[in-house]
Amino acid sequence: MGGYVYIITNRKNGALYTGVTAEITQRIVQHRERTGSRFASKHEIYRLVYIEPHDEIEAAIVREKQIKKWNRAWKIALIERDNPDWRDLWFDLNR
């Protein structure tokens, strides 16, 4: 079973939340409904700005742990490499 590493935010250069899931659409729905995590809910973090697919959930978990250890500048660089405008990728998932 595959998995996804994702980063959500409340605005460009705002608070960041890094997560991992096997079901990206379902997980982002949880965040958008403010039931995904206490931190994300408290800071109104639900805009999906980065997605990284993995063939195996175990690989996604390893990668999530790696990214969580990064400093903020590295995370922003990762987002801006693939999504320089910080578009909400949620709408891409639902096409």
Image (tube, grey):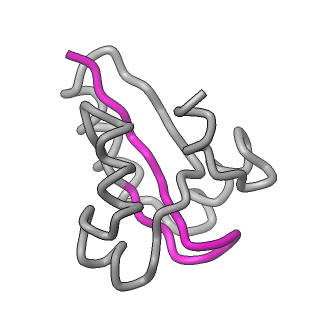
Image quadrant where residue 3 sits: top left
Spot the residue most to the bottom: 42
Left or right of 93 on screen, residue 22: left
Is 28 on the left or on the right of 76, as rendered?
left
Check residue 9 for magenta coloring: yes
Toward the viewer: 61 or 39? Answer: 39
Q: Viewed as shown, does residue 59 lie left or right of 47?
A: left
Tell which residue pokes out farthest to the right in this image: 85
Which residue is found at the position 35% from the left and 85% from the top? 42
Residue ID at (30%, 41%): 26
Q: Position of residue 61 (x, y in %)?
A: 24, 38
Residue sitting nearer the eye, 25 or 55: 25
Magenta segment: 1-18
Vertical order, 59 against 63 (above or below) = above
Q: Is residue 12 magenta?
A: yes
Q: Is residue 66 left or right of residue 71?
A: left
Q: Position of residue 2 (x, y in %)?
A: 27, 19
Query: Residue at 33% across / 45% down in the picture?
Result: 64
Quadrant occupied by the N terminus: top left
Q: Nearer the viewer, residue 40 or 72?
A: 40
